[in-house]
Amino acid sequence: MQILDVLLVLGGLVLLIAGGEALVRGASSIATRIGMSPLIVGLIVVSAATSAPELAVTVGSVISGEPGLAVGNVIGSNIVNILLILGLSALVVPLLIKRQLVRFDIPVMVGISVLLVAVSLDGQIGLLDGVLLLAGLVVHAVLSILIGRREVRVGAEGAGTAPIPTHGRPTPVWLSLLLLAVGIGLLVLGSQLLVTGAVSIATGLGVSSLVVGLTVVAIGTSLPELATSIIAVRRGERDMAVGNIVGSNIFNIGLVLGLPAIIFGEGIPVPAAAISLDLPVMLATAIALLPIAFTGFIIARWEGGLFVAIYVAYTAYLVLAATQHDVLEGFTDVMLWFVVPLIALTLVVVTTYEVGLHRGKRLAEREASASDEGSRHEG
């Protein structure tokens, strides 16, 4: 039976990679034809598609009476998306951050994460909570489309309005739609195969459904985002890669948790362990993206490496805590008193340096502009 589970995991990985390639090709081609920026495609079209596995797992978990798996899937996926997927993508090539992401989408992601933490404090995501979460997603999607259309009308000088490069003859509309549909289907099927095999292996080891959701299922359902982001980066569409991650996190909270909470009127129970640790970690990872985006409008390779290292440490803690390993206490002390303060100090120092560097550049540009203006007047 374990051999079959391993084969399911491997087969799911193959389908996810193929689905990510088809999805990016189809979405890019459609964006080119309708004049939509790759950022908006990543935020809306690709994000909705790659969040389909999370939605399927969450609905199935609620029906099966596994709320810990449902909540852990969403929380874990959002943590994976930022720390692991953005981190790995940045290690491949530094990721550019569009100004719209910094000014609007990342703050929205932080805001809806705060809302999720707030509505979960009573231990349940009820009907009204689901309406609020879903409404936040709808408002963001509508405003994103309106902003994207306005920037396209303004011209190519606006942020995120550069057309997607095409090579040779444009892809026919029917083929683009077919690629999009096939990509979504492969992503959903591949994710289901992978999760089925991985959950069977993990539960056989006696791990709780919350931990399974935070780790195995979260990584499995986030593999569409990983495949899509890395493929987009390799194709030179880095804004789609970042937009996909930010948009997916918003969709995961607004749609994947909001919609089931509305459908199942009894609400979705939130485990106490998730409220005390995992939800704050999810919120912290969303907030951690703000200074990186604001300082240089880029996620550098070393920052991506830092994100991956933090995720490895967090996952190690979950596994040690779930198995009650003897080294858990020492590991916790090292993380709490050494690693976390060191990471915080690094972020503060780098942010301060980058802000000062950009202020100096702006001051130099102003002085150069004033000097040129004075020279013209003298002439």
Image (cartoon, rainbow, N blue to C red):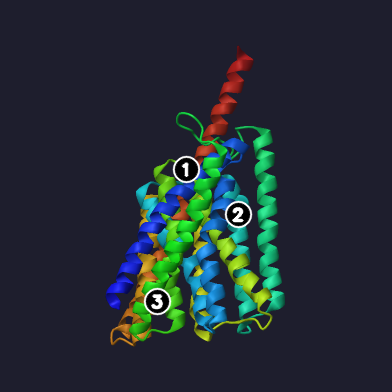
Secondary element at image label 2: helix
Against 76, is 107 above or below? above
Quarter holding residue 234 = top left
Image spot of residue 60 (x, y percent): 54, 75
| Residue with the mark numbered 1 | 237
| Residue with the mark numbered 2 | 105
Q: Nearer the viewer, residue 378 or 60?
A: 60
| Residue with the mark numbered 3 | 199
Q: Can residue 3 be seen in this view?
A: yes
Distance of label 1 from label 3 (alpha carbons): 33 Å
The kind of residue tagged 1 is Glu
Secondary element at image label 1: loop
Against 155, is 186 above or below? below
Distance of label 1 from label 2 (alpha carbons): 18 Å
Do the numbered discs 2 and 3 sit on residues whose CB atoms are within 8 Å? Answer: no
* Residue 56 in the figure: left or right of residue 311: right
Q: Can residue 87 be seen in this view?
A: no
Image spot of residue 337 (x, y percent): 37, 76
Against 159, is 116 above or below? below
Residue at 48% across / 67% down in the picture? 77
Name the image quarter holding the N terminus.
Answer: bottom left
Q: Which of marks 1 and 3 is in front?
A: 3
Residue at 38% across / 66% down in the picture? 310
